């Protein structure tokens, strides 16, 4: 990849490009362990062979066609109990970046907790791994994979920018703009504007305040997303009017409902 120069204070100012690696998150964590990662250190690769996603899934991306990177931050101002606030900032940063490319399209949404969706197809994913120091976050490794130029996928629920717009993209400038978008939202979080982040997240949340089918405890149930808690749990209102909060492993969207 060509050198990139994001207009940021610190995010991406230390940039490590690897032509191939197993996982950018793993590489970033090794840099932390070697005390070689500054705040904002970014690892980016053209080919990731063992990428990880939410729920332990593997993230697959065609080599040289997509954005695959990890950012190291030191958000000591975020208590461990409020780590989902960092998720809000990162997810919104990714959404801001995609909105700048696709326009203010209502089909562009954030699927709880950390996926970028266009209509009912996945455009990108985020995996944040935190290292704690007491009750605070010591380091965060923010892994991001976004489908950019890939045209074919093994699953019908995936898409890319190129498929949506019919054009090809140069990856270096997209990577620079993404790092800028991430830092803007991160600085918003650092300034303490959590309520604004929460409101913005709800406004672009996939299937928010709509009745859909969900899988809960192996059963399909109708429900309506009404909120996301400070701890990052999805709050679902069921047909009875009862509201329940769910963690990541406890509920799934049914995409073809």
Image: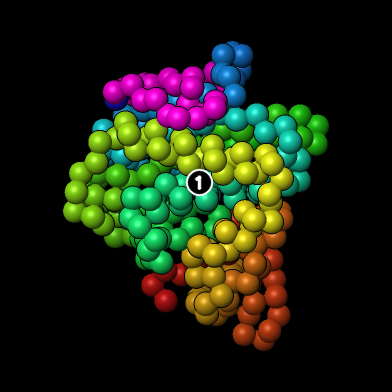
Q: Say whether residue 240 is magenta.
A: no
Where are the magenta residues, as a range?
Answer: 2-31
239 up-or-down from 256: above or below: below
Expressed as whole percent of the image width and height from the top left, the position of residue 62 reads 27, 39
Q: Quadrant of the C terminus?
A: bottom left
Expressed as whole percent of the image width and height from the top left, the position of residue 70 reads 48, 32
What secondary structure do most residues of the magenta stretch adopt?
A: loop
Question: Which residue does the image show at 51% across and 40% down from the upper left?
Answer: 182
Lateral position of residue 199 relative to residue 253, left or right: right
Expressed as whole percent of the image width and height from the top left, the position of residue 217 reads 60, 68
Lateral position of residue 123 relative to residue 75, left or right: left
Q: Residues within 10 Å of mark 1 (few under 14, many from 20)?
A: many
Lateral position of residue 114 relative to residue 48, left or right: right
- Whether residue 11 appears in this view of the structure is yes
Expressed as whole percent of the image width and height from the top left, the position of residue 90 reads 54, 44
Q: Secondary structure at mark 1?
A: helix
Question: Which residue does the image show at 71% across and 45% down from the upper left?
Answer: 192
32 up-or-down from 68: above or below: above
Question: Which residue does the image show at 35% across and 42% down from the upper left?
Answer: 60
98 up-or-down from 45: above or below: below
* Residue that mark 1 sits on: 93
Q: Quadrant of the N terminus?
A: top left
6 up-or-down from 53: above or below: above
In this figure, which colouring scheme has been used for the structure? rainbow
């Amino acid at each position: 990849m060509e050198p990139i120069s994001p207009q940021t204070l610190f995010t991406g100012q230390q940039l490590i490009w690897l032509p191939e690696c197993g996982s950018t998150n793993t590489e970033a964590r090794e840099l932390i362990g070697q005390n070689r990662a500054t705040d904002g250190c970014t690892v980016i690769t053209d080919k990731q062979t063992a990428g990880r996603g939410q729920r332990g899934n593997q993230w697959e991306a065609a080599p040289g066609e997509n954005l695959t990177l990890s950012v190291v931050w030191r958000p000591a101002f975020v208590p461990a109990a409020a780590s989902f606030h960092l998720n809000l900032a990162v997810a919104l940063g990714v959404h801001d970046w995609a909105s700048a490319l696709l326009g203010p399209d209502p089909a562009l949404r954030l699927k709880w907790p950390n996926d970028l969706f266009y209509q009912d197809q996945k455009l990108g994913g985020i995996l944040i791994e935190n290292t704690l120091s007491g009750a605070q976050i010591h380091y965060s490794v923010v892994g991001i994979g976004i489908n950019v130029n890939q045209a074919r996928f093994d699953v019908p629920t995936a898409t890319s920018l190129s498929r949506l717009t019919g054009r090809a993209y140069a990856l270096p400038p997209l990577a620079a703009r993404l790092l800028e978008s991430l830092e803007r939202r991160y600085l918003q979080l650092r300034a303490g504007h959590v309520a604004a982040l929460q409101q913005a997240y709800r406004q672009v949340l996939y299937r928010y305040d709509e009745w859909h089918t969900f899988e809960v405890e192996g059963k399909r149930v109708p429900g309506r997303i009404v909120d996301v808690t400070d701890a990052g749990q999805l709050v679902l209102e069921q047909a009875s009017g009862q509201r329940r909060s769910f963690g990541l492993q406890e509920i799934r969207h049914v995409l073809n409902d």
